[in-house]
Image (tube, grey):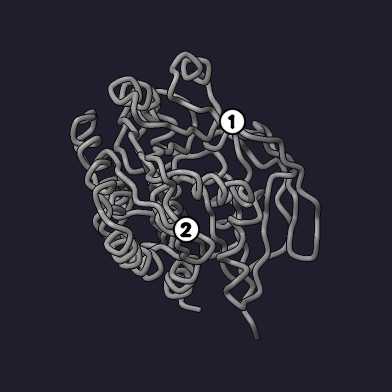
Amino acid sequence: MEKRLVVASHAAVVAGNRAPYEALSFSVSFWIPSTWTDSYRDYRVEPSEFIRPLPVWGVGRPQRYLPLRIPRSRPDFLVIEEESFSLSAWRFSRWARRRHVPYAVQAAENMNRPLPRVARQLRRKVLRDAQLVIGRSPAALDRVREWGFTGDRALVVHGVEGSPRQAPRPARLVVGFVGRLVSAKGIEDVIELARQHPEWLFRVAGDGERASDLAAVANIECCGPLTAAQMGDFYDSVSIVIVPSRTTPTWTEQFGRVIVEAVYAGRPVVAYATGEIPWVSSTIGSATVDEGDLTGMAREISWWTSLDDDAWRRRLTDMQAAVTVHFSAAAAVAELRRALAL
């Protein structure tokens, strides 16, 4: 008899986050908050044969939302796609323990940051009985080991949809930035780099609290938040993408999705060596500089600009091949299948 797998996840309100599980060719159902809010939009989840929307308290609070009612069904395995120190992971894991359902829990947190005592207690209880931890980066797996987990751990990356493509370079050097317009994403560094290099054009896709600061810089063009369908045209319009993310006391980059998305779109990337960015960049052969090193970032941008079209294409082709092997949607599905022993 085919096993029944259930994935409990607030992130699954986005269809793309369900895709790796749906591609398993396996009976998978999802328990998802019936409504959710993030920085970009409000979501309302419609029920289907495989989707069970759940009423929750704390809509839009990833670590603090609480499912109020959990379905009576008894799966063979439960994947809790939440952090081990979250209220939702504690609630789902308690439900699983009481019904003797084995479960896995996700680990994307890559900092051993101070947590309130209650969060540490929840984390201990969730990890104590987990059969598996699905880590989204090597550092995240290291953290759960530091927190006392001694069971099975598996690295399952956030796979990137799409296929590699090569678009012609713009005639003029155009530096691109994609992300939230906040200090942690290095928006001040984008502004300073633009001021240091008035001969370059900067195009910025995103929205956030620092959006108004960009308008005062003549060579920065603000595109606002773009849909996934619009991002292809954005990448075609730039020559290179920068990712100047900054580490804060409570956050550092957990993946750096923009890096692999840009490379797949045929654009090189220069990023600060922050959080998981060195792991991702070294895996695909992308460039990093020390955090805050605008001189180094400008030097890397100029180096890419100096390449002729053939050399540019060869290097990007090699990087795209590495993305396909390590960070593509197909790679993520293969890792997930191995982790769940399907």
Horizontal and vertical percent for residue 158? 46, 57
Around disc 1, counting alpha carbons within 10 Å, would you say few (fewer than 14), some (14 to 19), or many (20 or more)? Answer: some
Residue under the point 25% across and 58% down: 285
Q: Position of residue 90 (x, y in %)?
A: 52, 44
| Circle 1: element type | strand
The residue drawn where x is 57% and y is 57% is: 96
Image quadrant where residue 260 sits: bottom left
Above or below residue 95? Residue 298 is: above
Which amino acid, mark 2?
A: Ala
The percent coordinates of residue 130 (x first, y second) are 44, 58
Q: Between residues 184 and 175, which one lies in front from this camera angle?
A: 175
Q: Which mark is residue 224?
A: 1
Q: Is residue 249 in view?
A: no
Point 23% across, 29% down: residue: 294
Residue 87 versus residue 103 in the image, above or below:
above
Q: Is residue 319 left or right of residue 328?
A: left
**The one of 4 and 277 positioned closer to us in this rendering:** 277
> Looking at the picture, which amino acid does disc 1 mark?
Gly
Q: Single out the residue that lies furthest toward the bottom.
A: 1
Mark nearest the camera among 1 and 2 is 2
| 128 w.r.t. 252: above or below | below
Q: Give the residue at x 20% y 38%.
A: 299
